[in-house]
Image (tube, grey):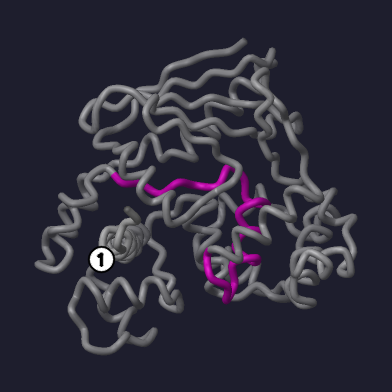
Amino acid sequence: MFATTITMKPPYSFERLLQRLLTHPDEQLQIDAAAGVIRRALRLDGQPVLVVFRFGGSVEEPVLQIETEAALTQRQQDELIRVSRHMYGVDVDLEPVYRRMRESAELRPLTEKFRGLRLLHDPDLFQSMVRTIIGQQLNLAFAATLTHRLIRQAGDVIVDQQGREFLVFPTPEAVARLEVEQMRAWQFSQRKAEYIIDFARAVVSGDVDLDRLHAMPDEDVIACLSKLRGIGRWTVECLLMFGMGRPDLLPAADIGLRNGIQLVYGIAEKPDEQEIRRIGESWAPYRSYVSLYLWEAVGEAKREAAREKAESKPRRK
């Protein structure tokens, strides 16, 4: 067994994270909201390990407890702490972000409404890129369905003592062994299957060195990965944001960001990429986080609309 406690840089809101997950479900996570717990399986030094993340304290004094029943080597313990800090943005300082957002009358209310919301980062870059390729030009629900099928068919499953199954994302080697016809049977398009398999094979062969990307500036990462078939600027920007945790990305081609700007800024028509980049200039160097809060404004509006619709339905006597 291994357990450790990490003090998180405030503010951090577990409740806001759960709200975002309502509109961005991840079947690798099993959540006990009442207990403040997220359970998920991670690969540590290549071995699937079930980990319990327990969120305690308060928004202004947050604490994260990490536990696993597995017997970890020192290397795995170090990797678990590093990955955990990365996934939950433990060391991110939101106060400079909020100061910048408060300079805008449109953005200021979001700093209070969503106080403590942070990006939930992917645990590794391979998973982040594959999930992003899957999500290209798809709605969230169908992208989640395809991701689930890929994990079920090519990944691993851990079963805990209560009989609960936890999905483990497939390795690059496992995805590289797939054939396009297999993925077509899971309802992947021809091109999307090709892009995912090609990327996995490039990682396995060493043509793509994911570890090397961490030392590269954003634009160099974009230039490097955009050479690959099926991977454009938007895809790499999502990798930089959700996989690497870079703070100043502006995915101007993202439809959700267009919707968020239209909603929060009260614009009559959805802005185009050029207009988004113009508006977003004032958000630097925190454009990733301003984008997150605009996305969440759209997500909150959708959840409120769904609640109102449910409440307006007549009840059976």
Percent x, y of residue 167: 68, 40
Q: Is residue 76 left or right of residue 8?
A: right
Q: Which image quadrant is residue 265 in?
A: bottom left
> Which amino acid type corresponds to the residue marked 1 in the rendered image?
Trp
Q: Nearer the viewer, residue 67 or 237?
A: 67
Residue 285 in view:
no
Q: Residue furthest top?
A: 1
Q: Name the residue at 44% across, 71% down.
A: 251
Q: Name the residue at 66% across, 35% down.
A: 166
Q: Is residue 40 left or right of residue 18?
A: right
Secondary-structure class at tag 1? helix
Percent x, y of residue 272: 36, 87
Q: Name the residue at 57% across, 66% down.
A: 236
Q: Is residue 87 left or right of residue 17?
A: right
Q: Which image quadrant is residue 143 in?
A: bottom right
Quadrant in which the N terminus appears = top right
Percent x, y of residue 141: 55, 63
Specify start and end residues of the magenta stretch as a single range: 117-140
Would you say residue 208 sits in the magenta stretch? no
Per the image, the residue denoted by label 1 is 283
Q: Is residue 253 above or below residue 23?
A: below
Percent x, y of residue 122: 55, 47
Q: Nearer the viewer, residue 176 or 303?
A: 303
Q: Residue furthest front?
A: 317
Q: Nearer the viewer, residue 260 or 19?
A: 19
